[in-house]
Amino acid sequence: ASGPPASTVGARKAAKRGRQKAKKGPRIRQGSPQEEAALAAHLKALAPAPAHLSDAGALAEVLVALGRDAAAAALQAALSKLVADQKAAAAYVEAHPPAEDLTAPPAKAAPPREEDGWKWHCLRPVTLEQLPAYN
């Protein structure tokens, strides 16, 4: 006794949604307490991988062998600028670390001063007996 096949449409949609979330990765939310730390980590991670630098060097060699010296020089100059800019950004982040953790609770407020007593007096609860009678 076999019945109709089970539907897997819902499971496929859930799996697809999970894959889409995984692709997006963590987001840096503007104004969040972790924004500065995430941006600092991002700047440090922008360095080109050694394998990419090696590939670019090999490509430059091939361009020179093919007589494309100008293209090889442009590639070398662009890659040198990228590496220098990334190192400068990483050095700046090291020299100016993100502010302290902003998720910590704020410091307690100072106790009220004596001259501010009138403010607190105005805020005291009022009972019906204290109100003037209006006839």
Image (tube, grey):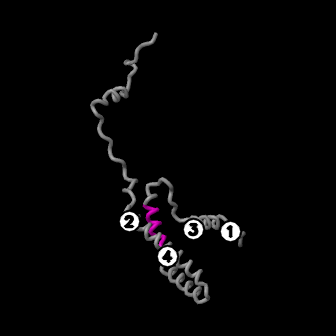
**In the depicted structure, whether residue 67 falls above or below residue 34:** below
Predominant secondary structure in magenta? helix
Q: Nearer the viewer, residue 84 or 48?
A: 84
Q: Indicate the amino acid at tag 2.
A: Glu
Q: Are marks 4 and 2 in contact (CB under 8 Å)?
A: no
Work out how far the residue at label 1 is from the one at label 3, CA to CA, in angstroms: 29 Å
Q: Indicate the amino acid at tag 3.
A: Lys
Residue to which mark 4 is pinned? 80
| Among numbered discs 1 and 2, the one appearing first in the sequence | 1
| Among numbered discs 3 and 2, the one appearing first in the sequence | 3
- Location of residue 110 (image quadrant): top left
Residue to which mark 1 is pinned? 6
| Among numbered discs 4 and 2, the one appearing first in the sequence | 4
Label annotation for residue 94:
2
Q: Are marks 3 and 4 in contact (CB under 8 Å)?
A: no
- Location of residue 68 (image quadrant): bottom right
